[in-house]
Amino acid sequence: MLIGKPAPFVRTFVEAVDDAIRAHHPSHAMSATQRTWLAFCVTAVLVTNSICWARFERASLGTYSLAALSWMFRHSKMPWDQLLVASVRVILRHHGITWGTLVIDDTDNPRSKSAKALAYLYKLRDKESGGYLWGQSLVFLVLVTPKISIPVGFVFYQPAPELSAWYKKEKVLKKQGVPKKQRPPKPAPNPQYPPKEQLALHLLETFKAHHPHIRVHCIMADALYGTATFVDGASAIFGGVQVLSQIRSNQNIRVGKRTQHVADYFATHPGTPQRLRIRGGQEVVATVGSARLYVCSHHTKRFIVAIKYEEEESYRYLIASDLSWRTLDIVQGHTLRWLVEVFIQDWKSYEGWSPLTKQPGEEGAR
């Protein structure tokens, strides 16, 4: 398909985004040339299903040259930091959205060993082979609403080099049987390389600052974010909102004066079969048990829900910060988290992060 000029609906959207930027940051507004370039690039992405200047040039029959398109990307002072925020504002206003659920997740993407110019590269553990590969990791925030689900924030994660070196040496020394007192201490946190939970909290703070009119019903995240720091911090950002996450089966809880693993507790307090409606649609049967228990690492009580679907052999353990919710509300609310998996696969397959041409450096990562 050939492109003579940007699609009308894309041009209209870009104009609306520019108006949103002007309303909040008049000095960051786009020029007419920048708006035309952006509208053409968005149209070209839709037509060619790629982010490649050469393909864009061919699709336009040379109307827009590769050199000119690349120069605009690299040297034109586009308000990159404002584009996503303004785009989200336009979409939310168009659909009349005033509330939703925020979901935190992260994903890895393998890269070639020769891809040295890309930003935020480090060694990732390959779950399939058990080895290591070169790649990038991204933490993102998705807003789930009754009408649409859209990404509203992204940030790259990269571990501190000194921490990675320490883990590598620690593993070798432990295997050699060296006592803990004789092993090097864990290095202090490096503020230039924040952990994923801090990045997630920053995304939540940024979303609240940019979209204060959106009422957040709940915040969800997987087991990686099931720490007291994240659960309490995320809840506090939005005035005590419910936070749903997961804990490990060997997490210590306290029942009376007795400390035990959460899996051991629910082994003696089995759940009962319950019919659940997945995201308002299909009904499934799951074994569900729950209790309000003191979680030792959190130093407070959490609403713990043990759930096991029909095809599963073991429980997973959800936690909720707000003890007033009902068990089934927590379970059915948690099913919204799987919409993120759909987003990840769609984004990697069709929206540009995994298969398409990459731009080098930190600027290209934006």
Image (cartoon, rainbow, N blue to C red):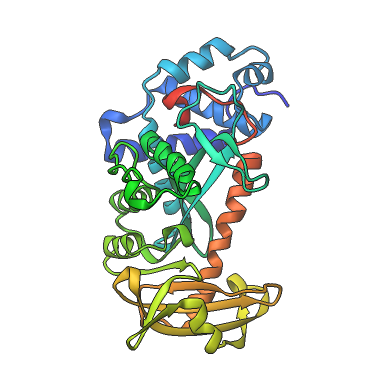
Q: Please report the residue visible at 62 percent of the width from the left and 48 percent of the height from the top.
A: 127
Q: Residue furthest right?
A: 1
Q: Residue 155: percent from the left, percent from the top?
A: 42, 41
- 170 or 336, which lies in front? 170
Residue 208 in the image: state x and y as whole percent. Answer: 31, 54
Residue 186: which quarter of the image? top left
Relative to residue 324, is residue 220 drawn left or right? right
Residue at image position (61%, 36%) is: 354
Residue 183: percent from the left, percent from the top?
36, 45
Q: Residue at x 39, y 77 (%)?
A: 253
Where residue 12 sits in the image (x, y, percent)?
Answer: 50, 37
On the question of residue 97 being in view, the answer is yes
- The number of numbered badges drawn on the structure is 0
Quadrant location of the C terminus in the rendered image: top left
Compared with residue 244, is residue 95 higher up or lower down, i.e. above or below? above
Placement of the N terminus among the 4 image quadrants: top right
Which residue shows up at 42% across the image and 26% down it? 362
Note whether 38 is above or below 105 in the view shown: above
Residue 187 vs 59, above or below: the answer is below
Q: Quadrant of residue 310?
A: bottom right
Q: Is residue 32 left or right of residue 28?
A: right
Question: Which residue is nearer to you in this view: 124 or 356?
Answer: 124
Q: Measured along the vertical axis of the image, is residue 255 above or below residue 29?
A: below
**Residue 64 shown left or right of residue 227 in the figure:** right
Q: Nearer the viewer, residue 88 or 286?
A: 286
In front: 99, or 107? Answer: 107
Residue 155 appearing in the image: no
